Every structure is written in structure tokens, then in C-alpha cells.
Amino acid sequence: MKLSSLVVRDPKVNHYNPPHQVPLVAASSFVFGSIEQGMDIFDGKEAGHVYGRFGNPTIDAAAEKIAALEGFGMDKPCYGLFCSSGMAAIATVLLSLCEGGGTVLTQGDLYGGTSSLLDDLSSRGIRRITTDLRNTEKIEDCLADCADICVVYVETPSNPLLRCTDLEYLSDLAHHYGALVVVDNTFATPIIQQPLRLGADVVVHSTTKYLNGHGTGVAGAIVCHDEALMQRFLPTYRLFGGSGNPWDAWMVLNGLKTLAIRMERHCENAQQVASYLCNHSKVAAVHYPGLAGHTDCGTIRKQMSMHGGMLSFEVAGGLDAAMAFMNRLKFCTLTPTLGDVDTLVLHPATMSHRGIPREQRMTYGIKDELVRVSVGIEAVCDILGDLEQAIG
């Protein structure tokens, strides 16, 4: 072998005993021992990897870990896909389940990106019906009147008003009418709520948020407990470029190690922040699942083990007062994301829901003066001190 060839070729990697942590495998493709083995792996007759877009040891490990968390305690296996973003996960599921058209029944109080996606899909033959998914009569009326509903899509707690939907009841009703239930579990995480155990068919995550927890990457996940259903997602996942990458998968795997203890602290701090805001003269309303007066307290007790780290509140004085509050923040961070270890504040009307027409947004209760807070794990006195000086 020539020296110029030697510098190109990789050395032999010795596998003596396994590493303590899941390794970051950065390879874009994988080697076959023979053409016959390659054919068998392509056909699924032999386990193995082909190309990074189809899977990778690090990506697979992250998907399997998230699936195990969502399916914890169930008597059936769960299957996962690791995606390039939360939106990629949502789009993959909706495009796969509504193939050839169909209708999605959902709520108005919904992440702005998801709402915009549904609006875009409507131009591609996938219709959207919006109703209050906590209202049993309205749900059944929609399902009975529209036989074309193939998916009921729900966020609980919702973004940004923290409304909570009874997943067990919703799943039973949807299944009666032949529809599948897809749940965005980003806010709660599987530490607080496990939708598959409550009857849901599919769970989606923006792993960018709590599952990673440190703001170091963008990714998403899909989990379900039906292998045949998971097979329906694979063509869209692979062909539309929805697959994740090894670096983000590795970062999520590391973040997941502290998820349980992080969520405990997020919840403890959020409860104190919500209680403080409830007693503030310049706060018109507070939305948090841990408050005694929450309209969905029965559902919350039934399906959530804790109340989460997310809350929103309305600053008395309207849009100008809300924007002035945001600009006075010093300790908390003004940024359009959530779920990091530090406290993050967002103004839905000008940020996450900026693309939603104001009239539509106001109809769903997402007011100009609404502020969303992802309460971090810092010393709560520092969070409260900043909120106090910013509210004025």
C-alpha cells in the first residue's frame, strides 16, 4: 500500500469491552461484509445499518430510550423514531396517517408552528377542524358529523394556556369513531404523563426542550406501541428527510440522564412562581396546572404525577405593559424556546404565535398581554426577584 493510500484508510477499531457511555457514531454509512449481507440488511432479513438517514447506533439508542420512557410500565413494547426536529416528528405523523387526504380534529390553543403546519396541509388536501377537546359534546359532534376524521391531535398541557385534556376519555371516543389519537407530550414529558398508557396511539416530542434540557440541539421524536403503525411512518420519515442526526441524539441521551431530577425542580419552582403571580396586583390571570382553581383540575389529578415547569400569565395593562415587562427582564432570558435548565420567557403574540392572525389567536384565548414562562431550576428567589422588578 502506498503512503498516500494509508493516510486515507481508517485503522482497525478494536472492540475489547464496551464504553461506559453510548458512543457518538458520526459515520454516514456502514460497511457490508458481502453483497449478500448488504441485500439482507436492505431487505430487513438481517439486523444492521445502511445509511445515516435510515438509522445509526446513536440515533437508534436515543429513539429506544425515549420509547422506553413513554412505555414504562406497559405490558407491550414501544417503538421510537428520532427526528430532526419536533416539527419533523409532527409532520411525519400527520402526512403518514392522512395519506391521500383526511381530516385532523384538534384544538385552538396550540403551538403556533403546529397550527401553521395544519394550515399549510389544508392546501394539500388534509382538512383541519378545531374545537375544544375538553368539551365531550363538541368532540362527539365533530366525530359523528365528519367520518373523514382520521387523527385527533392534542397538546396537553396546551401551549401556551396550559389547558389539560382527558386523554383516556378522548382516546376511547376517538377509537369508537375509527380515529387515532396523537399527543404532543413535550410540556409534560414521560416523567409527568404517559399518554400511551392512557389510550393514545402516538406520542410526539420536541426533544429540543426538556428531554435535552440544555438548549444544545434541535431534534424530535415519535413513539407508538403498535409496530405496524410505526411501519407506516418509515417511508415519510426516510424520504422527506425527517431523520435526526447522531450529535443531537447523543446530546439528548446525555440530557435524559437528569430528566427526572430536573423535572422535580422545574415543578417545585413553577408552583412557587405561579402562587406568587396569583397574588400580584399587576397580574390579571395565571395559567398553571398546579393552581387549585384550574378548570381542568380533575383531569390533572387523573393523569399527571406533577404539574410541570410551564406557566403563562396575563400582565394587567395589555400589549404595552407585556412588552415593557419583557424588556425589563434581567435574570430571566427572553428567547423563543422552553425546557432549558434556566428560566426562559416568551411573548406568544409577537413570537411563537406571531404567524397566527390576531382575531384567530384572540378567539382561542391567546391574548396580547399573555406571557409564557418556562421556569428553570435556579434558586427560585432569583427568578421571583427578576419577575418582581420587571412587572414593576
Image (tube, rainbow, N blue to C red):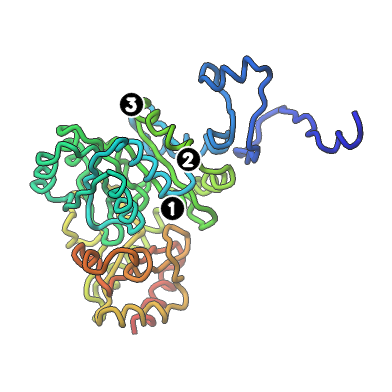
**Which element is circle 2 on?**
strand
User: Could you say which is closer to the camera, residue 385 or residue 356?
Assistant: 356
Q: Disc 2 designates what residue?
A: 82
Residue type at mark 3 is Asp
Picture coordinates of residue 380, whole percent (x, y): 41, 68
Q: CA distance from mark 2 to mark 3?
A: 23 Å
Whether 242 is drawn above or below 361: the answer is above
**Which element is circle 3 on?**
loop
Picture coordinates of residue 141, whole percent (x, y): 9, 44
Q: Disc 3 designates what residue?
A: 75
Picture coordinates of residue 45, whole percent (x, y): 52, 16
- Residue at (11%, 46%) from the top-left corner? 136
- Residue at (25%, 58%) from the top-left corner? 109
Whether 324 is drawn above or below 81: the answer is below
Classify 10 Å Cα crowding around label 3: few (below 14), some (14-19), many (20 and above). Answer: few
- Residue at (27%, 37%) from the top-left corner? 200
First of labels 2, 1 by sequence position = 2
- 353 with respect to 30 (left or right): left
Observer-side mark, 2 or 3, equals 2
Classify 10 Å Cα crowding around label 1: few (below 14), some (14-19), many (20 and above). Answer: many
Q: Disc 1 designates what residue?
A: 210
Residue type at mark 1 is Tyr
